[in-house]
C-alpha cells in the first residue's frame, strides 16, 4: 500500500469556520500575534493569552469537519495515510483520520509551564491558578513563535517515506514546517491544493490545483481512488 502524507494548514480549517492568522497584517482576530502566540506574550500577560485560547477552544466546539477532512479520512481505505498538520484544532480526528501529527500543538491539551512533557487533556477553560502536577501554571499546549518544534524529526521521517505528498490549505510561509517539502524523495509525487499563487516554488515539481480545500480534495480523491 502506497504512503500518502497530508501536510495541512489553516485553509482547510477555515472552510469549517475557524478564523485564521493572516501574515499580511500580523493580527490574529485583532490581537498582535506576539501578544498571544509567543513566550514574551505569555510573560507579559498570562490572562490575555489564556483567554485568547479559551475562546478558540470554545469556538472549536461549534464547528464540524468539512468534506476535505472526510475525503482525507476516506483515502485510508486505499492508502497508508499520515497527516502532518500545522493546525491546532481536532477536525482531522473528528473526521475519523487515525494517524495525525500535530506539529504546532493541540488546542484541547494543556501543559506545565515548566515541563513540556507534562501534558493534559483540556476540554474546558484554563484559568489563572490552574496548576500542573509540578505546581506550575498550566499553559496551552501550543508551539508558539520562537519555540522549538519538537515533532519536526517525526514529521521529516514521514515526508521522506511518502509516495505522494499533498500540501493543502497552507502557503508554506511558516518555518520550519515550510521546509518539509524539501525532504521528499525524487520519486515522490507532490500535489499542492491552494486557490492562490504562492511565492514558495516547491522546487518546480508540484502539481498545483488552484482550488479551495474541499474542491481540490474532491478532484484529487477521484483521481487517486482506483476505478
Image: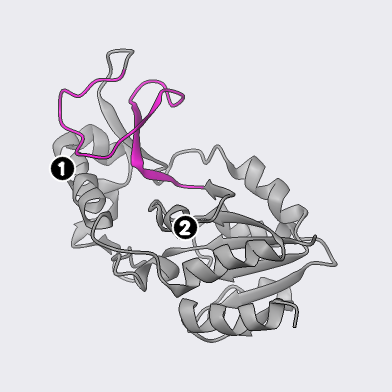
Crowding near the residue tagged with mark 1, few <14, some 14–19, many ≥20 C-alpha atoms within 10 Å = some
Would residue 164 be found to the left or right of residue 192 on screen? Answer: right
Q: Are the residues tagged 2 and 1 within 8 Å (C-beta)?
A: no
**Camera-nearest residue between 88 and 149:** 88
Which residue occupies 48% across, 76% down? 213
Question: Along the horizontal axis of the image, is 203 left or right of 125?
Answer: right
Task: Name the residue beneath numbered marker 2.
Answer: 92
Give 211 or 72, whichever is nearer the viewer.
72
Residue 154's x, y, as percent? 65, 42
What range is drawn magenta here?
103-132
At 67% from the left and 63% from the top, the residue drawn is 77
- Can I make out residue 169 in this image? no
The kind of secondary structure element at disc 2 is: helix
> Which residue was labeled with disc 1?
48
Separation of marks 2 and 1 at Cα, in angstroms: 28 Å
Q: Secondary structure at mark 1?
A: helix
Residue 113, how many percent across, how many down? Answer: 33, 25
- Whichever of labels 2 and 1 marks the residue nearer the N terminus, that label is 1
Residue 123 inside the magenta-drawn segment: yes
Q: Quadrant of residue 188?
A: bottom right
Amino acid at each position: 500500500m502506497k504512503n500518502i502524507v497530508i501536510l495541512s494548514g489553516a485553509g482547510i480549517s477555515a472552510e469549517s469556520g475557524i478564523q485564521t492568522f493572516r501574515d499580511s497584517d500580523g493580527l490574529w482576530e485583532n490581537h498582535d500575534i506576539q501578544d498571544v502566540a509567543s513566550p514574551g506574550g505569555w510573560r507579559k500577560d498570562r490572562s490575555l493569552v489564556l483567554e485568547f485560547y479559551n475562546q478558540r477552544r470554545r469556538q472549536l466546539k461549534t464547528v464540524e469537519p468539512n468534506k476535505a477532512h472526510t475525503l482525507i479520512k476516506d483515502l485510508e481505505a486505499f492508502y497508508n495515510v499520515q497527516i502532518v498538520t500545522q493546525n491546532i484544532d481536532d477536525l482531522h480526528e473528528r473526521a475519523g483520520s487515525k494517524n495525525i501529527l500535530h506539529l504546532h500543538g493541540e488546542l484541547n491539551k494543556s501543559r506545565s509551564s515548566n515541563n513540556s512533557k507534562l501534558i493534559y487533556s483540556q476540554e474546558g477553560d484554563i484559568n489563572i491558578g490552574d496548576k500542573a502536577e509540578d505546581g506550575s501554571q498550566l499553559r496551552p499546549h501550543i508551539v508558539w513563535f520562537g519555540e522549538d518544534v519538537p515533532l519536526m524529526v517525526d514529521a521529516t521521517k514521514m515526508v521522506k517515506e511518502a509516495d505522494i505528498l499533498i500540501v493543502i490549505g497552507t502557503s508554506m510561509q511558516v518555518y520550519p514546517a515550510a521546509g518539509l517539502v524539501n525532504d521528499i524523495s525524487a520519486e515522490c509525487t507532490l500535489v499542492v491544493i491552494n486557490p492562490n499563487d504562492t511565492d514558495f516554488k516547491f522546487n518546480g515539481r508540484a502539481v498545483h490545483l488552484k482550488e479551495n480545500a474541499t474542491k481540490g480534495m474532491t478532484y484529487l480523491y477521484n483521481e487517486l481512488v482506483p476505478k
